């Protein structure tokens, strides 16, 4: 099973990708998480990516395509994965097609979480992440048991540097300019399945489950 999750910042791609990867027992590949890890470790990739990420701009295609090419070589990605945050430009989508054609493993579905800008802004400005393990919370939608503390590892919850209001607005602009053409790209290939990203976490998961059922695939 090879799936892409498509949608604006704050659509809930990361949240749903985590659940889907657990339920389907497939690898969750998040370019955003990989880049944040590289920034934290101050690797060459992280140092190159940081300026773009801080500004809410996309990291250049060549860097991201090389990162995905490398990741797809891992044995646990050899057949199945959920891609979250990639592709984000037409060039990345074409590169993914090529990488998957060579491996004879075409995409099964592109799940498009169609989300209103107001919802994106509310979710991103209220998001808090664990500085230690990276788990996502939200100040109203997904609260931790103890304010400011991660339920899972007791790390401190912080705001992502790119979740500041001005950067959020730029990320949404970048999404409209560079990523929305992929809706048509995947529609033309008959891969696109759409649902509302404005639904709450459980309702959205149920909507995604129905899209799998339309393809004859059951999620337990
Ligand atoms: P990335 O980390 O991919 O950021 P993004 O696409 O902007 O997505 P987000 O993580 O902000 O949102 P999401 O849709 O995953 O929502 P989430 O589930 O977290 O990328 C960051 C940066 O890295 C980019 O700006 C770019 O610089 C670079 N980058 C990454 N990939 C790249 C690429 N391919 N090419 C070039 N550059 C790249 O949820 C958000 C919040 O809402 C959370 O607080 C959550 O708790 C809450 N929430 C989630 N779902 C719901 C729901 N259904 N109802 C209510 N609340 C919800």
Image: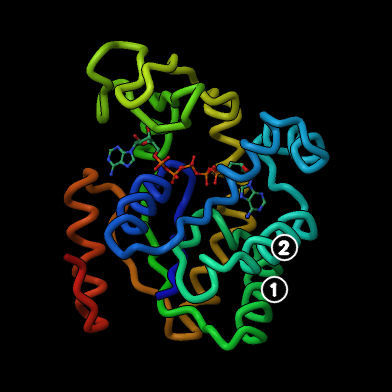
Say left or right for 78 vs 112: right
At horizontal 40% and vertical 64% (from top left) the residue drawn is: 26
Say which of 36 and 43 sits in front: 43
Q: Is residue 113 left or right of residue 161?
A: left
Check residue 123 in the rendering and tell me which mark sits there, or answer none: none
Q: Nearer the viewer, residue 148 or 211?
A: 148
Task: Residue under label 2, please give it.
Answer: 65
Of 164 and 212, nearer the camera is 212
- Which of the 4 image quadrants contains residue 65? bottom right
Q: Confirm or deny contact between disc 2 and disc 1 (CB under 8 A).
A: yes
- How far across and how far down the image is residue 50, in percent? 74, 33
Pointer 2 or 1: first along the chain = 2
Q: Is residue 122 above or below residue 96?
A: above
SS label for mark 2:
helix
Q: Which residue is mark 1?
A: 95
Near mark 2 (Cα within 10 A), the count class, few <14, some 14-19 or many ≥20, is some
Residue drawn at x 42%, y 79% is 108
Q: How far from the left and from the top, in percent, is residue 154?
A: 37, 17
Is residue 66 shown above or below 128?
Answer: below
Q: How many marks?
A: 2
């Amino acid at each position: 099973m090879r799936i892409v999750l498509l949608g604006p910042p704050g659509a809930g791609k990361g949240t749903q990708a985590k659940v889907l990867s657990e339920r389907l027992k497939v690898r969750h590949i998040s370019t955003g998480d990989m880049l944040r890890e590289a920034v934290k470790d101050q690797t060459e990739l992280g140092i190159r990516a940081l300026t773009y990420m801080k500004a809410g701009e996309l990291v250049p295609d060549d860097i991201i395509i090389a990162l995905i090419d490398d990741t797809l070589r891992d044995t646990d990605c050899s057949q199945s994965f959920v891609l979250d945050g990639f592709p984000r430009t037409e060039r990345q989508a074409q590169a993914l097609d090529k990488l998957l054609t060579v491996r004879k493993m075409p995409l099964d579905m592109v799940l498009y979480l169609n989300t209103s800008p107001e919802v994106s802004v509310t979710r991103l400005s209220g998001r808090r992440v664990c500085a230690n393990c990276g788990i996502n919370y939200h100040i109203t939608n997904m609260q931790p048991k103890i304010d400011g503390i991660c339920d899972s590892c007791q790390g401190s919850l912080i705001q992502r540097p790119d979740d500041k209001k001005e950067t959020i607005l730029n990320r949404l602009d970048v999404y409209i300019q560079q990523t929305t053409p992929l809706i048509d790209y995947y529609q033309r290939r008959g891969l696109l399945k759409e649902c509302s990203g404005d639904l709450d976490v459980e309702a959205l998961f149920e909507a995604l489950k129905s899209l799998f059922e339309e393809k004859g695939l059951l999620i337990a």
